[in-house]
Amino acid sequence: MLEIIQAGEVAPSADQVAGRADVGLRTVFRHFQDMDSLYREMSVAIEAELRTVVEQPFRSADWRERLIELIGRRAVAFERIAPFKRASDVFRHRSKFLAADGVRLVEALRDILVSQLPPQIAADTPRLEALDLLMSFESWSRLRREQGLTPRQAQATLEAAIRRLID
């Protein structure tokens, strides 16, 4: 399923998964109870990709520079998980697991952001909400897909916006 999604199919069927694995449909469902089980595997892949990028120690002691560093890290992570995130968004309305997982991802990204902010900035609700929005997957995706920016251009755009917001 992961390979199919990575190749560009946002909503692969169980038949496609079986065909790609060169097994029968029954075999797929012997290993996975239902499609939600396959979605869980996709979620594990997303989480693993994010973890490798976000768990690295920050180089800068200055919180402003750590935010800029965080944008770069998220750029790498968001590029890696983009196909899986889009696929999970397609099925979110059908899967309680994916709906909850989407909320959990947003909360985890926000927690990471808040952990890098000084208390006075974290307590400034409008600024925190703006930072959270700018550093979200949704903002990244819009810059990349709808606005047609390259990863480098999208990152530079976010860095400029964040710098203006935190100065």
Image (tube, helix red, strand yellow):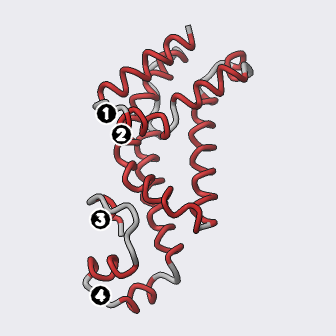
Of pointers 4 and 3, the one earlier in the residue sequence: 3
Near mark 2 (Cα within 10 A), the count class, few <14, some 14-19 or many ≥20, is: few
Q: How far is mark 4 from mark 1, CA to CA?
A: 38 Å
Along the line of sight, the residue nearer the viewer: 35 or 166? 35
Say above or below: 131 vs 43.
above
- How far from the left and from the top, in percent, is residue 107? 63, 43
Residue furthest to the front:
146
Q: How far is mark 4 from mark 2, CA to CA?
A: 34 Å
Q: Secondary structure at mark 1?
A: loop
Q: Are marks 4 and 1 in contact (CB under 8 Å)?
A: no
Q: Secondary structure at mark 3?
A: helix
The residue under label 4 is which amino acid type? Answer: Val
Q: Is residue 166 left or right of residue 161?
A: right
Q: Secondary structure at mark 4?
A: loop
Q: Is label 3 or label 1 in front? A: 1
The residue under label 3 is which amino acid type? Answer: Glu
Q: Quadrant of residue 150?
A: top left
Q: Residue at x 44, y 63 (%)?
A: 42
Say above or below: 29 vs 113.
below
Of pointers 4 and 2, the one earlier in the residue sequence: 4
The residue under label 2 is which amino acid type? Answer: Arg
Q: How far is mark 4 from mark 3, CA to CA?
A: 15 Å
Numbered label attached to residue 3: 3
- Which residue, given by chain and number where applicable, does mark 4 sit on? 23
- Which residue, given by chain and number where applicable, does mark 1 sit on? 148
Q: How far is mark 2 from mark 1, CA to CA?
A: 5 Å
- How far from the left and from the top, in percent, is residue 20? 26, 77
